[in-house]
Amino acid sequence: MATAPHLEFERDMVEVQEQIDKLLELAEKKGIDVSSELGELRGKLEVLREETYRNLTPIDQVQVARHPRRPYTGDYIERVFTDFIELHGDRAYRDDAAIVGGWGRLGGETIMLIGHQKGRDMKANLHRNFGMPHPEGYRKALRLMRLAEKFRRPVVTFIDTPGAYPGIGAEKRGQAEAIAMNLREMARLRTPLLSVVIGEGGSGGALALGVTDRILMLEHSIYSVISPEGCAAILWRSADHRDKAAQALKLTSSDLHRLGICDEVIPEPAGGAHTDWDAMSRRLGDTLRRHLAELTEMNADDRRKARWAKYEAMGAWREAQG
């Protein structure tokens, strides 16, 4: 795995890491023992990393959620599940590479896996459209969910997108209708549904995979009706106010868990999921097994009623006096 680029708030950590690298280089060239100094610096780095990631601001969380080395849907499918068989196309127009889906196994149980997929480089991002699905992507996702319902198999969705693609072609092919159809049909499905926000959950493009029995979020993921930059541009006419917007949007996992939107926050390794893909995958796998076991034990009618009640209870309002 390539060295991860550093974020703005990691400057102090970078300086300590550079000191460690210089010591290692010196030890190799001179053949001297620097184990004592290395131990001290590594301990300092670990404390600094834990303190930094324990006190992230909302806009810092946004940066971590968008980190280019953060594990994507395909990375988790490879590490958490076995026997993955990808299924393609919406049977109406084409296959959309911004959403991947197919059958996989978790602990011997067959599950339908569906998720947004970004690319690691420019070529892959162009192929995946930067993780922004077209309407045919959402229609493919719904086709696979219905297939899972037919065979009475659970569905796990991975949410990681800036939002649905807003291009003219997507609008012509019914982007809004495709998203709305997913929202309605996911509310109706009788099979267990579980979603995990693994990175950036943006607007309706994320919600189209998110009307599920349980909503899980990785610790440093975000879930919001609009990006901080977009919100700032609308409210303050400038993206320079994105820090203020991120604070107001309550888009972090801790905020959404407190508000009752997120059912559980999955802790990430110190320094974020991008620092240890395998450790994060193990934690994710354990959490998915637990929630799926609970959901599959429920009666289908009871599970669907609980799903409706979950979304009806979200939000707050006040009736105006006549």
Image (tube, rainbow, N blue to C red):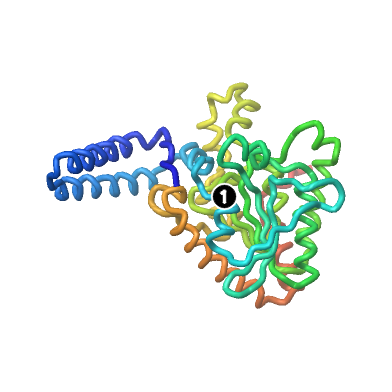
Q: Secondary structure at mark 1?
A: loop
Which residue occupies 81% across, 34% down? 169
Which residue occupies 66% across, 74% down? 296
Position of residue 12 measured from the top left corner of the image (x, y, whole percent): 31, 36
- Left or right of residue 72, residue 276 in this image: left
Position of residue 307 measured from the top left corner of the image (x, y, whole percent): 71, 64
- Left or right of residue 208, residue 121 in this image: left
Position of residue 117 measured from the top left corner of the image (x, y, whole percent): 63, 47
Q: Give the residue pinned by disc 1.
A: 72
User: Compared to 13, does 189 lie above or below?
Assistant: below
Which residue occupies 50% across, 51% down? 254
Q: Residues within 10 Å of mark 1 (few under 14, many from 20)?
A: many
- In the image, 48 versus 264, the foreground residue is 48
User: Compared to 283, does 31 lie above or below?
Assistant: above
Q: Label 1 sits on what residue type?
A: Tyr
> How many labels sit on residues?
1
Q: Quadrant of the C terminus?
A: top right
Which residue occupies 71% across, 40% down? 164
- In the image, 75 versus 316, the foreground residue is 75
Residue 236 placement: quadrant: top right
